[in-house]
Amino acid sequence: MKKLFTAIYTKFQADTALVGAVTDLYNTEAPSNAVFPYIVFSMVSNTIDLDSSQNWENYLIQFNIFDDDSSPSNICNIYELLKGDTAAGTGFDYFDLLIEDYATVVMTREVAKLMRVDNVWQYNVSYSLKTVYTGEVATEKYCIHLYNLMGI
């Protein structure tokens, strides 16, 4: 998971427009002294899918944008930056996330919801991410998992 988290933060840092629109991107929880607007991302789920030669990983990643502005205009602009422009390589929509030892098969936005809680706007944006293990021992890793399953 650490490699995935590093890849998400690296992608965020490379997107100058998104970085300029928020104070920071936090993993799982923002500190109590975080300054609005900011983004928190978390891994909601991770499942493995094995076939005869590949080790697939399926993730559900959620980004939560927070802003205490009275108008939803600013948070909606940040949401557009988070989605990005696929052709320009900005944002996370269909982005080929660079994860060490994995290839991104597809990263798609699943659902987005804007709400206001205690005078704070919150935009919840979920992405499904499918990756395949590309390390040198992908087949060996599959066989180990298969033998472990057979031993149950």
Image (cartoon, grey):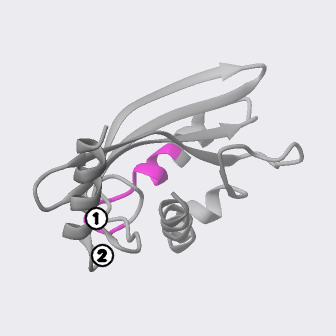
Side of 33 relative to 110 (left or right): right
Figure quadrant of residue 55:
bottom left
Q: Position of residue 58 (x, y in %)?
A: 32, 45
Which mark is in front, 1 or 2?
A: 1
The reply to whether discs 1 and 2 touch (Cβ–Cβ < 8 Å) is yes
Q: CA distance from mark 1 to mark 2?
A: 9 Å
Of 105 and 124, nearer the camera is 105
Q: Which range of residues does the magenta coloring cover?
A: 79-89
Side of 23 relative to 41 (left or right): right
Q: Is residue 106 visible?
A: no
Residue furthest out toward the right: 33
Q: Image height check: is 25 above or below 63?
A: below
Q: Position of residue 62 (x, y in %)?
A: 50, 40
At label 1, counting other C-alpha atoms closer than 10 Å, the crowd grade (few under 14, some 14-19, many 20 or more) is some
Q: Residue at x 55, y 48 (%)?
A: 78
Figure quadrant of residue 111:
top left
Q: Amino acid at mark 2?
A: Gly
Of 32 and 46, nearer the camera is 46
Secondary element under disc 1, as helix, strand or loop, is helix
Side of 42 relative to 67 (left or right): left
Q: Residue at x 48, y 67 (%)?
A: 7
Residue bearing mark 1: 141
Q: Position of residue 49 (x, y in %)?
A: 24, 45
Residue 137 painted magenta: no
Residue 84 painted magenta: yes
Side of 39 relative to 84 (left or right): right
Q: Amino acid at mark 1?
A: Lys
Q: Position of residue 115 (x, y in %)?
A: 59, 21
The disc label shown at residue 135, or none: 2
Give the mark nearest the N terminus, 1 or 2.
2
